[in-house]
Image (tube, helix red, strand yellow):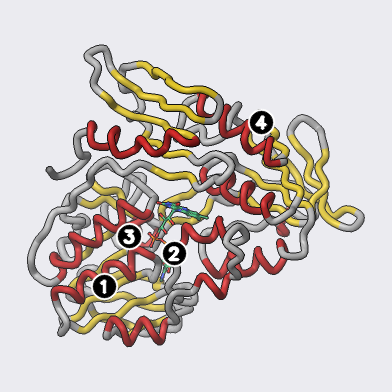
Amino acid sequence: MSIVIIGTGLAGYNTARELRKHDTQTRLILVSADSGRSYSKPMLSTGYRKQQTPGDLVQGTPEAMAEQLDARIITGTPVEAITPHAATVTLAGGEVLAYDSLVLAAGADPIAPRLDGDAADAVFQVNDLDQYERFRAAADDAHRVLIMGGGLVGCEFANDLREAGCEVDLVFPESAPLPRLIPQRPAEALHAALENLGVRVHTGVTLEAVDAGQGGLVGRLSDGRELAADAILAAIGLQPRTGLARAAGLAVHHGIRVDPWLTTSDPAIFALGDCAEVSGYVLPYVLPLTNAARALGPTLAGQRTAVKYPVMPVTVKTSCCQVVAWPPEEGTPGEWHFDGDGQDLRGEFRDAEGTLHGFALTGKRIRERLELTREMPPLLGD
Ligand SMILES: Cc1cc2nc3c(=O)[nH]c(=O)nc-3n(C[C@H](O)[C@H](O)[C@H](O)COP(=O)(O)OP(=O)(O)OC[C@H]3O[C@@H](n4cnc5c(N)ncnc54)[C@H](O)[C@@H]3O)c2cc1C
């Protein structure tokens, strides 16, 4: 028996840990395109505030993880193909690994910005520790940082870099931050808090071009304005990594399609984490993958277990104004109702019968998350 896991992010390593709680015997191999160091990705956007270097974020070297998990860990080696009928994966360099069960925990690609200009290649993206290390090498010396994207990652980095003393410009096309997570009123509270902290927030504009200027970079915005920067970070969204699965003939929609047992359209292949679409849900956050790994561990050990998804509100770690939210599904009939003032808001999205379908809490009101989470039915399982 042999289990192969593609990916050493939180999804890959959590699955391996959960498997080992139920099965200490089966041969286990993890393959990673990156350096294979174990770390908690959410810590990347609070590194300055917590005075942590990229090295401080490493929780385990691949060697230590191999020992802890009694596994072979292959790093810096992308899997290039999956051959389901032979039950093998082919690695860059040509090694072929046979599996009885294969786990796809390959994460997501950050969406690359389309930019004009002679320095467009200088723009950073941070979706793993290796990329963060490269960004920090530039940002530690940078005084002015321009950030594209007003989502969770963009807002958290803006907050963190501003606290580190950088001048920060945050640029996004929507009218307020966190557009896919929270409605206008709490978003305005976060916008005001970021500005109070000293972040320059530019709404309704996109970055169009990056050129090398005198002593740094110059970003040109869609309204014609120019912003000077020493470093530019793009955080404009994620695309589940589905290429390997698609090429292997597995069912793919927004993510790699899996059922509540995390099984793909091939019964020997499973998927979880940012690359997966679990019963229609693409949830690129830690709690969903933790719940998924907790089910997949016993399943891989022979005790078929369905994943349970309670409502898992998203926490945005903007210390200037924290946010905890669970947005209603698109198209759900109902209205937002707000309570509170200034930064401390509680928003509830209820239908005509009073049923709660989503919520958004900011500032001190984030303490009320449990009460609201408990009021909502689980997404999957009981
Ligand atoms: C800055 C930042 C802050 C965040 N903050 C939060 C937060 O506060 N709360 C929260 O819930 N979520 C947060 N998230 C999201 C959360 O961190 C992710 O959902 C989670 O870490 C995804 O884990 P993963 O294992 O699915 O993917 P990844 O961590 O991306 O791991 C994917 C792995 O697959 C490997 N891989 C990919 N392709 C191949 C291949 N072909 N062959 C071999 N290996 C391959 C990669 O090398 C990597 O090891 C944050 C994300 C970012 C970027």
Q: Which mark is residue 40?
A: 2
Q: Which mark is residue 187?
A: none
Residue type, mark 1 in image = Arg
Residue identified by numbered label 1: 17
**Residue 83's image quarter?**
bottom left
Question: Dot 3, how many residues are within 10 Å of its Cα: few (below 14), some (14-19), or many (20+)?
Answer: many
Contact between labelled residues 3 and 2, with CB atoms less than 8 Å apart: no
Looking at the rendered structure, the secondary structure element under dot 3 is helix
Q: Does residue 3 appear left or right of residue 368 in this picture?
A: left
Nearer to me, 97 or 152: 152
Give above or below for 308 relative to 32: above
Q: Which mark is residue 245?
A: 3
Residue extending farthest left = 303
Depth check, mark 2 against mark 4: the one in front is 2
Depth check, mark 3 against mark 1: the one in front is 1
Q: Spatial distance from mark 2 to mark 3, Cα to Cα?
A: 25 Å
Give above or below for 154 relative to 14: above
Q: Spatial distance from mark 2 to mark 4, Cα to Cα?
A: 30 Å
Depth check, mark 4 against mark 3: the one in front is 4
Q: Which mark is residue 203?
A: 4
Residue type, mark 4 in image = Thr
Give above or below for 142 relative to 333: below
Q: Earlier in the sequence, mark 3 or mark 1?
A: 1
Depth check, mark 2 against mark 3: the one in front is 2
Q: Earlier in the sequence, mark 4 or mark 3?
A: 4
Residue at figure coordinates x 18%, y 49% from the top left: 308
Confirm or reject: label 3 Cβ below 8 Å from ligand 1.
no
Confirm or reject: label 2 Cβ below 8 Å from ligand 1.
yes
Q: Earlier in the sequence, mark 2 or mark 4?
A: 2
Residue type, mark 3 in image = Ala
Looking at the rendered structure, the secondary structure element under dot 4 is strand
